[in-house]
Amino acid sequence: MENLPQVMQPIYEGKAKRLWETEDSDTLRMEFKNDATAFNGEKKASFESKGRLNNSISTLIYRYLETVGVPTHFVKQLDDTNVIVKRVDILMVEVIVRNVSAGSFCKRTGVEEGKAFSQPIIEFSYKSDELGDPLINDDYIREMQLATPEDLVHLRESALKVNEILSGLFAEVGLKLVDFKLEFGRLKSDSSVIVLADEISPDGCRLWDLKTGEKMDKDRFRRDLGNVMEAYEEVLGRLKERLGGE
Ligand code: UDP
């Protein structure tokens, strides 16, 4: 019995990714799955190339962010669906940045989709599938001890900086960055350092074609618009042209 191979288990499995331990206790392997979910997991599907596409898109973006001075968890791409990332404790606060009205902003306010804001809106939600990631504010975050007020200043500043960098990048490839979600984590190797973590892909961003207004993101899946992976492939192709990559 003692010779039976050990079956490796992920240390975490989420809706779109799995995390695996590596030989280095300060890093993890992050695997992008082909599964797609929406409406807090109520709508489910699987797309054959989704893991590869999101991994490629997120890798290009994270490498770019690192080159322009944004600290992230990214270490290196391993293969089509895996990257090595620094091990972090994820903050249970999701940071959403909005440049144009869409999604839950419209639902909450009655404002029609597509209104450009005079300046970006930052909002926070409590990262809890059980509760449906509810909107929270600075006072909730302080009292729930999800982050310190100093951390929050840092999260806001980082999110605005990432927004400026990525809005510029996407504009260069003919896409409007409408809104997106960021997650941050404290480095396991130095908990005083907070870095950008998770992924940045059309799963967590709204991207509209600047010429046609066409949606090039997960709204194609949410709203049954079809050609979901074709849109992700197009986003990847444009980013590759701008940033390089095989
Ligand atoms: N988002 C995400 N994960 C979430 C919630 C939102 O990636 O758990 C992204 C979403 O794809 C969009 C942006 O954050 O690009 C703003 O989403 P919104 O609050 O409008 O929520 P939704 O429309 O997904 O209900």
Image (cartoon, rainbow, N blue to C red):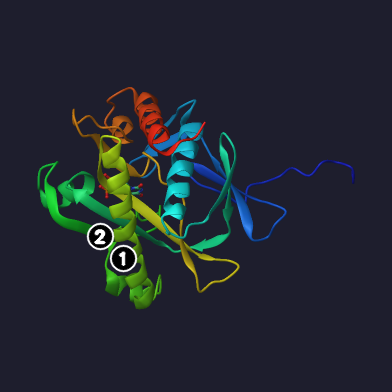
- Point 31% across, 65% down: residue: 156
The residue that label 2 is drawn on is 122
Question: From the viewer's perspective, is 194 left or right of 21?
Answer: left
- Point 23% across, 52% down: residue: 98
- Point 43% across, 48% down: residue: 64
Q: Secondary structure at mark 2?
A: strand
The disc at residue 2 is none
Question: From the viewer's perspective, is 242 left or right of 224?
Answer: right
| Spatial CA span between label 2 and label 1 | 7 Å
Q: x%, y% of residue 167?
A: 28, 47
Q: Are marks 2 and 1 in contact (CB under 8 Å)?
A: yes
Between 200 and 19, the residue placed more toward the observer is: 200
Between 158 and 238, the residue placed more toward the observer is: 238
Image quadrant containing the N terminus: top right
Q: Amino acid at mark 2?
A: Ile
The residue that label 1 is drawn on is 156
Among the two numbered marks 2 and 1 on one chain, the one whose residue lies closer to the N terminus: 2
Mark 1 neighbour class, 10 Å CA radius: few under 14, some 14 to 19, many 20 or more: some
Between 132 and 61, the residue placed more toward the observer is: 61
| Relative vertical location of residue 215 with respect to residue 110 in this rendering, above or below | above
Mark 2 residue CB less than 8 A from any atom of ligand 1: no
Q: Is residue 15 visible?
A: no
